[in-house]
Image (tube, rainbow, N blue to C red):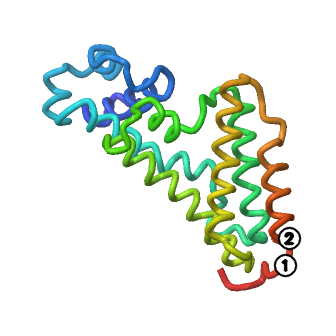
Amino acid sequence: MTTSATPRERLLDAAGELFYRDGVNIGVDALCKAAGVSKKSMYQLFRSKDELIAESLASRGPMYQVLLHPGADDDRSPRERILTVFERQDELVASGNYLGCPYVSTAVELKNPEHPGSVVARHFKQQLTDFFHRELVTAGADDPSTLAIQLTMIFDGASARSVVRAQPLGGIGAATASVLLDAAGVHTGELATQAR
């Protein structure tokens, strides 16, 4: 956090870090102390802690996606692009700082699907499924909608396993996704030259 950051930016940064590390039930006092912002200022900037939860998750979402998704200029086959997500998940887990998917963690803690934080979490999880779906359509897969959901479930399952087991995934997510893609006939090189 830079010293030139505004109080709002400091709150979003502190909230993003603390909610991910300690959970969304962390107190407002601890949040404000970490951000160097008074409670009065916090409530002037955000209507509620619930709004801060949602906005901090939304502010970190694009950065998390960049860590996982291959770029638009990555011209590998759809299968390779899909497997990149699982390989990058492996790398995040192996870094030792991975505490699970921030969207799943937040939604599970909140337990209320209508909470603003749950709505943001659902939005970003859908973007992962949408990424898989686009790649599967490009690959010419049968039933890309179902397959995209299955791939998202593999990702989330691997994420949960990494937290519960407190150890690296060792490629299990990518290997499981590969089996699913093989069964669906999505192979490297096939139809990969179709326009993106």
Residue 7 drawn at (x, y percent): 25, 31
Quarter holding the C terminus? Answer: bottom right
**Residue occupying the point 68% across, 25% down:** 164
Report the front residue among 160 and 92.
160
**Residue occupying the point 80% across, 82% down:** 191
- Read off the residue under disc 2: 187
Is 127 rendered above or below residue 154?
A: below
Quarter holding the N terminus? Answer: top left
Is 35 rendered above or below residue 145?
A: above
Report the front residue among 80 and 112.
112
**Residue occupying the point 38% across, 43% down:** 113
Left or right, 113 with respect to 69, comes to left
Left or right, 190 with respect to 18, comes to right
Residue 131 drawn at (x, y percent): 60, 64
Left or right, 82 with respect to 20, comes to right
Amino acid beneath label 1: Glu
Amino acid beneath label 2: His
Left or right, 107 with respect to 46, comes to right
Residue 179's quadrant in the figure? bottom right
- Read off the residue under disc 1: 190
> Residues at badges 2 and 1 in contact (C-beta under 8 Å)?
yes
Q: Residues within 10 Å of mark 1 (few under 14, many from 20)?
A: some
**Residue occupying the point 80% across, 68% down:** 184
